[in-house]
Image (cartoon, grey):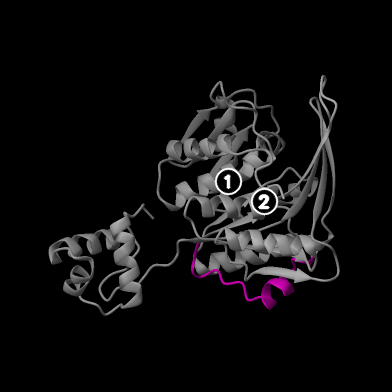
Amino acid sequence: MSKITEREKEILKILKNDPMITQLDVARVLKITRSAAAVHISNLIRKGYILGRGYVFNDKSGVLVIGRIFVDILAAKASAGHSASKIDICLGGPAYNISVHLAAQNIPAIPVSVIGRDHYGDIIGEKFNKKGLDTKFLIIQDQFPTPRRLAFIETDQSSEISDGRAIDMLSVHRLQSINVTINHCGMVIIDSGIPEEAVNYICVLSAAAGVPVFFKFNGDVKENAYYQSLDMFDYVMMTMDIAEDICQYKIKSLDDGIEAAQHILKKGVGKTVIILPELGVVMADEDGAVSVPLQPSQKILDRCDVDIITAGVANGIIKSYDYRQSVRLALGAAGKRDVYDDVF
């Protein structure tokens, strides 16, 4: 869907409150002419927010984000010349990062994930509520703690361990029990870290509802199970190492990245996005491909940046931006975030 103006937002709200209201009454409420109201309503129809006469609304603008949420414990070792190390606790994981950054771009996002009935689970719910996110599909369970991830950050290398036992509880049975609704979504984003049976189930539901699936690879070993079934997904997002693994050759430039994206398209994917952490981003479909290099001032892209770029590209697709604009906006959003932007 295309962007709408503030006036069109006002009119859309009026129409939803009273679908039988006349154009003249809309004009009276907003103190504008009837002809101006008619133009705004025609624009809403053209942009897809209204499906025609009688003000039947197209609410397929939200995004269901299905994946992992982590409490990240970040331990940064003191650098040369400094006496103190740094330990911070913040929220992360694909479902958290993508949902929050979609909401920041005015795209309604509904996260689907598993948390514990504990202090951290309460904080996640509070954070989502403050950011205007719907928490009805957050599964709260007693068996395992809210997933946690401990990362040791050093200048030359990093390592981490994680406790994500709760994620395995995101089963088909659990998804059925919370009655996940896909029909009214504009897109479903799936984090590859959830159980494979859940991925397959969501893809079947999405296909039946005619809702596109955006699959985000995370670099886990088990992800190679999807290499031969990429045609399940309308869009795929991956980093360079995953693309190299699928294509079986090294990517050394943005042009190589485009070639890899086109190779992956032949496996039945609608659109392919590849992030080259030190170079930039490429995006391709059957109509063509674009590459957007990192600017000299931009840092090497990390895991959280990949989540933010996923949200930005999804936003661009939903709003019908061209590829280059979508990628540039996504890279811009990633460049503005702080490493510890959700510390508590």
| Identity, as a three-letter code, of the amino acid under mark 1 | Thr
Residue at the spot of label 2: 94
Q: Locate residue 46, reporting x and y percent.
A: 28, 59
Answer few, some or many: residues within 10 Å of disc 1's Cα (few below 14, many 20 plus, some between 14 and 19). many
**Rendered-image quadrant of the N terminus:** bottom left
- Is residue 341 or residue 109 the one in the foreground? 341
Q: Give the residues in magenta.
A: 169-186
Q: Locate residue 293, reporting x and y percent.
A: 53, 26
Q: Is residue 267 visible?
A: no
Q: Is residue 202 visible?
A: yes
Q: Do labels 2 and 1 touch, CB within 8 Å?
A: yes
Residue 195 figure quarter? bottom right
Under circle 1, the secondary element is helix
- Is residue 62 or residue 285 the one in the foreground? 62
Residue at the spot of label 1: 310
Q: Locate residue 313, reporting x and y percent.
A: 51, 45
Q: Residue at x 59, y 47 (%)?
A: 236
Q: Is residue 175 magenta?
A: yes
Residue 153 figure quarter? top right
CA gap between label 2 and label 1 equals: 9 Å
Q: Is residue 78 above or below residue 44?
A: above
